[in-house]
Image (cartoon, helix red, strand yellow):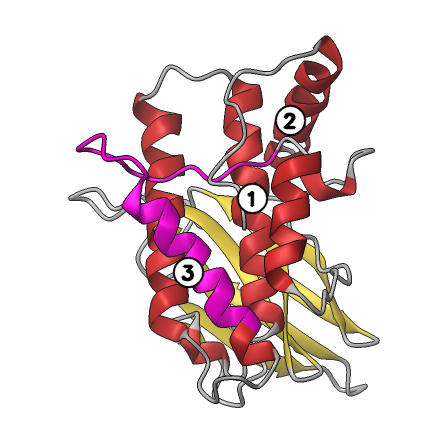
Amino acid sequence: MLLHKINLVCQTAAIFVLLSLAFIGCKGNGTSIDNDSSRCPDGAAVDAPNNLEAYFDSLLRYTPAFIYTRNVDDIEPNPDSLAVLGSIKALDDYQAHRISEYPREQVADALSSLIYAQWHNDTHGDDEEEIMAGSEMFLFRYLEQAARLCPHVDYLTSIHTGDDRAGIFTGHEFSEWHQPYYCILLYRQGSGYRTKFLKYYNEYDRIEVMSDSAGQSYLLCSSTSMGNSKPILLREVEGEYVEVCSSED
């Protein structure tokens, strides 16, 4: 059975350093660090475990990752955390063909809960950066697996290309202003999708497939609503998307 979460207090100086580096690495637009489980989604191939429940159990046992969700009524066990665990089981059932439909509502609810808690703690909480990195580590690994198994990009994104090739996942802060928190590209790889972190605190409401005279394919992410969300151009290279530039460069 999956653990609900690991201890929020780091037990050793080594873990403290690891988590601090993980948080800094993610805020640095997705560079990898020594512990690969700590990286931001960067378009790299991800684990494809046959047993998702065992995979996340190992993640929670042997890395600093933990499930962090809302628990406004201090109910134990936390119902939102239990719902996240339930969605992992549903994804595992889908992967093993025990159910025929992708559990899109359960996944959406789990992501909503995880992102809300992450945003709220980031903007209102007192936790140290290493604690924030542990919960973000779980969130990113969860999104990668949900995307890997997702059959259609519109199951996880509302902004996407018309050919099911790619979409933009925007994790909103769930405030009354509905401002963005995460912005992550999903693009087709095999029967599912890979994830590539784009920016924090930016929102893109358009994604277009483009090509040049040589037949080179690109994705252009842009915004018609947020002036600080500068366009991002990504070039396709052997099925991967590499950021060429943004207008900030």
Q: What segment is highlighted magenta in the picture?
A: 65-92
Task: Write the residue at 58% across / 21% down.
Answer: 130
Q: Position of residue 143 (x, y in %)?
A: 54, 58
Above or below for 101 versus 80: below
Rendered image quadrant of residue 37 = top right
Task: Write the residue at 44% across / 86% down.
Answer: 101
Q: Nearer the viewer, mark 3 or mark 2?
A: 3
| Mark 1–mark 2 distance (CA, rounded to whole Å) | 16 Å
Question: Are the residues at dot 3 and dot 2 in contact (C-beta closer than 8 Å)?
Answer: no
Q: Which amino acid type is shown beneath numbered disc 3? A: Gly
User: In this rendering, would 70 be left or right of 233?
Assistant: left
Of label 3 and label 2, which has the lower sequence position?
2
Toward the top, the furthest residue is 13
For label 1, the SS is helix
Label 3 sits on residue: 86
Q: Nearer the viewer, residue 80 or 228?
A: 80
Q: Which amino acid type is shown beneath numbered disc 2? A: Ile
Instruction: Give the class, few, some or many, for how many residues have Cα within 10 Å of label 3's Cα (few <14, many ≥20).
Output: some
Task: Write the residue at 31% across / 47% down.
Answer: 80
Disc on res. 67: none
